[in-house]
Image (cartoon, grey):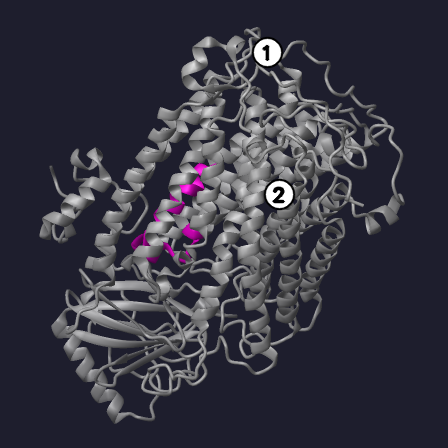
Amino acid sequence: MTGPPSDTPESPAPGRKNPRRRAAVAVALGALLLTGCQLPTFGAYKGATTQARSTFHLWQGFFITGLIVGGFTLLLITWAIFRYRRRKGGSDEMPVQTQYHTLTEITYTVLPILIVFGLFAATVLVENKVTAVEPNPYTKIHVYAFQWGWEFEYSNGVKIIGQTTDAPTMVVPTGETVQIRLDSYDVLHGFYVPEFNFSRYASPGYSTYFDFNVLHDGVYRGQCTQLCGLYHSLMFFNVRSVSPSAYTTWLRVTDAYQRSHPSSIGQLPADLHANQNGSVPSYSGNTGNSGNSGSGNTGNSGGALYGD
Amino acid sequence: MTDVIAPPVEAPPVETHEPTEPHPPPQVPGDGHEPHGGGHEDHGPTGILKWLTSTDHKVIGLSYMITSIVIFYISGIMAMIMRLQLTSPHSSLLSFAQFNALFTMHGSLMLYLFAGPFAFGGLANFIVPLQIGAPDMAYPRLNALSYWLYLSGSITMLMGFFVAGGAAQFGWVAYAPLSSATSSPGAGPDLFLMGIALTGFSAIFTGVNLCGTIFYLRAPGMTMFRMPIFTWNMLVTAILILIAFPVLTAAVVMLFADRHFGTHIYTAVGCHLVNGLPMRSCGSPLLWQNLFWFFGHPEVYILALPFFGIVTDVLPVFSRKPVFGYKGMVFATMAIAALSTGVWAHHMFTTGAVLLPFFSFLSLLIAVPTGIKFFNWIGTMWHGQLTFATPMLFCLGFLFAFLMGGVTGIMLASPPIDFATHDTYFVVAHFHQVLFGTAVFAGFAGVYYWYPKMFGRMLRESLGKWHFWLMFIGFWVTFMPQYVLGLLGMPRRVASYPSNLGWQSYNIVSTVGAFLIAAGFAFLLVNFVVSWRNPIPAGDNPWDGHTLEWATTSPPPHHNFTHLPPIRSERPTWDYNHPDALTVPHGKDAHNGHANGKVKETV
């Protein structure tokens, strides 16, 4: 048997590490998984973090299960419609008035229960991985959501703030564990990065924590998903992943800059890594007063930021 | 007026092995040009005064249905406007505030004011007493009160559009603290909350009424396990209403107190001040979500079970077979209801504040009884003799729609997949497929199926088929692209979206589909008008129905029945009309054919 599909060679497939997990996933996916390791994505992102990859494989498993079960049911319905339709000129004989068939009924009660157990087992394994929080992450970022923007506060005091058309960019180290502590200043918001296959509410008065490990350098667009009032549609942000060394440099330079310019708002040192990825616009950030905009990153902040 | 118990029943023969002589059909077809049934004496006032003062369950049921269908059309128009807005990334058709108000009211109207009241206030009110051989609902005046509370609640909610600041803009779920006085000031939100409170009481009273009716007003012979599945489902729905709606009403009252009396039940004021840890005295926005979804998820099944019941009544009639696995169907309904009270937090997976495995497992488990229902529906058609009148088409449309919505529902029951798709268009597509499948496909199957009973006239089959096919095609064209949009990461409840992400084309396709659906519903209106201008008389039993409502005139007389056929199975009218084709209880007897079919004795 082959393990869960790994679509790109450089991605650590979650199943490889743990035979127990691999077995459980295989139970859930059934025989179809055994036939190949290049499954389609079924419309979902493959995932830009290790956690997202796990979710992606779970998605594939659920999709295939859904295809099999749904397809089978669809087939039965369609067959019944065509096979048992009253035909023109056909016999008008009364159908047999059957009401029960105990064995059939037991079968279609027990089989779904078994499928549910399989799906649940796979769910729990992936869910534990996705929601796991490391005691000693590489870096911690405190994210505050507010109407209608984001504030990213690093442990050394660096703050990146931006709102609506002036989307802020969170810089993170590639491959390392980033721990987010998520809070809200006012109403509910949703921290959502599509390519991370993950979202989490930012609730006022209730902090939540989650980890991610970005697989590749790049810029990943994020957006608020939970309705938060008038400009909910415009509450964008970006996550930019750079090498750990570049991240450390960026953090140090930005920190020094923000300390030496306490009154200057919205000005960051020159983009340190623009040359690494030509398509990436400069990250923006207003320090201090979030109400001030018009500087930093202008335009194009919402889109075209896929880090392929 | 309802001290009257069921009218006298023909003495049931004791030995029921071989019904001897086929009886003549219980009723002669009515005169189509005279839609008043039966030639019995009239009761009470007529005309507008009848509609205003009647406590007859049929009049109240029709009032409910007409009101809720008007609301359905209003809400549908809102959906069309929103779909138009989304055809372009930065459309200026609507302002953000207008868009937010529209989707809030679209959802609220559809869920609070259409789907539920249409089912348990409209159809159930009209049909349940007929199906169990009762002369009326158990508490007719309470029934009238329900309707008038519902109507005033609906008007209250709609009035939001006419006050300064406009209607509520925080979504139909009214999540705290966005729904607080600080974040959503103005009279619109208050009218929204009052509308919910009024319709909430209306629903509770209807739930009480349905329970009383079903428990106490069944005709002699109508044991619990001979009730039609629609009535069974309405009973379970009524119990769910009694579980869920008081919670909602109480939660709404507390929210109102937060907004006006300075309570801080759902606010987190000051919570941030103590080193990020919640202060002991601060309220909890999450409490609102827990209370709301403790109502909200049973509500989902309050909006689904009645429509499952319609399908379970219609499929056998157009397959000329009894419903397959009757008892399994009843227990599946109960299982769904029981599970539905323990899955509310699957709407809250992404709060990070709920026990994921518990709610995930129970949510997945709901697939089992739902699957049983599915296979029972297929089993009902199996070896049947299917004809495809409009009600049957709508039921088949329901099967396809609900299958797709159900499969994606299983995906969303898995927290990691929910993390990836929560609050995106994937969820929008999922719940529209589920709710459109139930409330619209199955709901309008019920309209086409029972319209002849309600008015004594047929709807036109050709117009009905136009309605169905436009809606069926439009349904897939509308919602399948929304799954893709969701997987691409388009959040729900956005009035604009970035133009460079390739979302526009999917949105345009979705909008085209939505207008196909709207065109289908134009045919329904035409159908109503045509049937009113040029009535085709329906007769008492145009579909060769199985259940008791087809044993009386169309429309039924004031207290429903002048006489009843004997009730010896769950389809007395069928037994009466086809005494040589009684139910074969078990599959293994099938080879004996109908000649040896035995009447089931379950007393």
Q: Please give the chain letter of the residue carrying mark 1.
A: B
Decide: is B557 above or below A294: above
Cα separation, mark 2 vs mark 1, equals 31 Å
The residue that appears at 41% across and 79% down in the rendered structure is: A185
Give x and y (percent) for residue A82: 47, 19
Residue A145 is covered by the magenta coloring: no
Question: Of label 2 and label 1, which has the lower sequence position?
Answer: 1
Q: Which residue is mark 1?
A: B18
| Helix, strand or loop for disc 1 | loop
Three-letter amino acid code of the residue under disc 2: Phe
| Drawn side of residue A224 relative to residue A141, left or right | right
**Is A98 or B305 nearer to us in this picture?**
A98
Q: Give how far across and how far down residue B593 sits, in percent.
A: 49, 10
Q: Count numbered badges in the picture.
A: 2
User: What residue is drawn where x is 41% and y is 39%?
Assistant: B369
The residue segment tinted magenta is B401-427
- Provide the secondary structure element on which disc 2 rests: helix
Horizontal side, residue A157 vs residue B93: left or right? left
Residue A183 falls left or right of residue B378: left
Query: Residue at image x 61%, y 34%?
Result: B445
Which disc number belongs to residue B215? 2
**Mark 1 residue type:** Glu
Check residue B403 for magenta coloring: yes
Q: Are marks 2 and 1 in contact (CB under 8 Å)?
A: no
Q: Nearer the viewer, residue B50 or B158?
A: B50
Q: Quick one: B375 or A2, which is closer to the camera?
A: B375
